[in-house]
Image (tube, grey):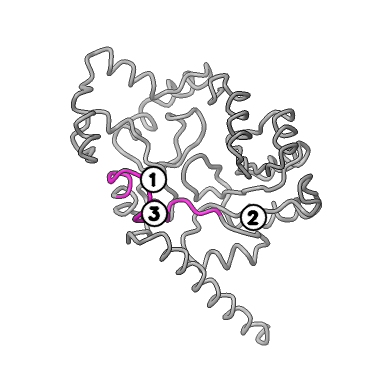
Amino acid sequence: YDYTKGKLDELVDIIIESGAKLFVSAVGVPPKAVIDRLHSHGIVYMNMIGHVKHVQKCIDLGVDIICAQGGEGGGHTGDIPTTVLIPAVVELCNKARSPITGGPVQVVAAGGIHNGQLLAASLMMGAGAVWVGTRFILTDEAGAPKAHKDAVRTAGHDDNVRTIIFTGRPMRVRNNPYITDWETNRQQEMRELAAKGTIPYEVDVDKFMREGGNGGASNAAADADDDEDDPLEQFRPYLMGKCAAVVNEQMPARAVVDEFVNDAVKWIQTGNKMIAKL
């Protein structure tokens, strides 16, 4: 399935012309010609992966950074836990070289990382940095709608699920009755649609609109930044990782970063004190 709708080359032109420094690919890898174009303009190429088997293909294409996301992560994700995935990916990347830097391919850890303790743990597993998503949804500066922020803030440990209905690929989102119906009663239909390259939920949206979907209610809800009465609400995927269950407080983004750094330092210092005990 082509998520760029045939406009990849046009989009790459815009990326280059805009002066971007980093290109991130997810749900697959870009064509080699695209990577070569990016590199020729000094743009670093990072690829998201959710399985160890995807690493070598990225290395062969000339990846500079691998962002390895464990199954706890929100959005498109695999099912390998972060603590299993990161060390395995680090081992492979240490043997490869970045075409841009000439040094080892760097690993960025992702998937369930929501505080300084897990930042410290990621560094100890060999990652050079972390990629944080869910925690920043619940910040003052986040552009996410109120309904998305509330979905993160109120989520419990069993309130999100991986589903293919929204993109044809496994994606972790906040569960709702509509998604549950697909996952429990319409699995065969889901697989058949995905096999044909049809996004399952789009079938329902098209049907809803043909039958006179209440677009006016949708617009009014959007204007009010309140989706509770929006009939299209059930079709909106609220991406979030498993850590949403413990992300409950909205804060300024700067406060989140400061808390990450300060807590990570404390945990690393605690780890240093343990060396004498080993």
Marks 1 and 3 sit apart, C-alpha to C-alpha, by 9 Å
Residue type of the residue flagged with mark 3: Ala
Q: Is residue 72 magenta?
A: no
Going from the N terminus, do you reach mark 1 or mark 3 first? 1
Q: Residue beneath label 2, please?
A: 86
Q: Nearer the viewer, residue 92 or 19?
A: 19
Q: Residue beneath label 1, please?
A: 160
Residue type of the residue flagged with mark 1: Asn
Q: Residue at x 37, y 36 (%)?
A: 237
Q: Nearer the viewer, residue 60 or 191?
A: 60
Give percent across and percent down for residue 252.
37, 61
Looking at the rendered image, the quarter that the C terminus falls into is bottom right
Question: Does residue 118 lie above or below 199 as drawn?
Answer: below
Marks 2 and 3 sit apart, C-alpha to C-alpha, by 21 Å
Q: Nearer the viewer, mark 1 or mark 3?
A: 3
Going from the N terminus, do you reach mark 1 or mark 2 first? 2
Q: Residue beneath label 3, please?
A: 244
Q: Nearer the viewer, residue 165 or 38?
A: 38
Residue type of the residue flagged with mark 2: Ile
Element marked by disc 2? helix
Tell whether label 3 touches label 1 (CB within 8 Å): yes
Give percent across and percent down for residue 167.
47, 29
Other-residue count near label 2 (Cα within 10 Å), few / some / many at <14 / 14–19 / ≥20: many
Other-residue count near label 1 (Cα within 10 Å), few / some / many at <14 / 14–19 / ≥20: many
Which stretch did the figure color magenta?
Answer: 131-149
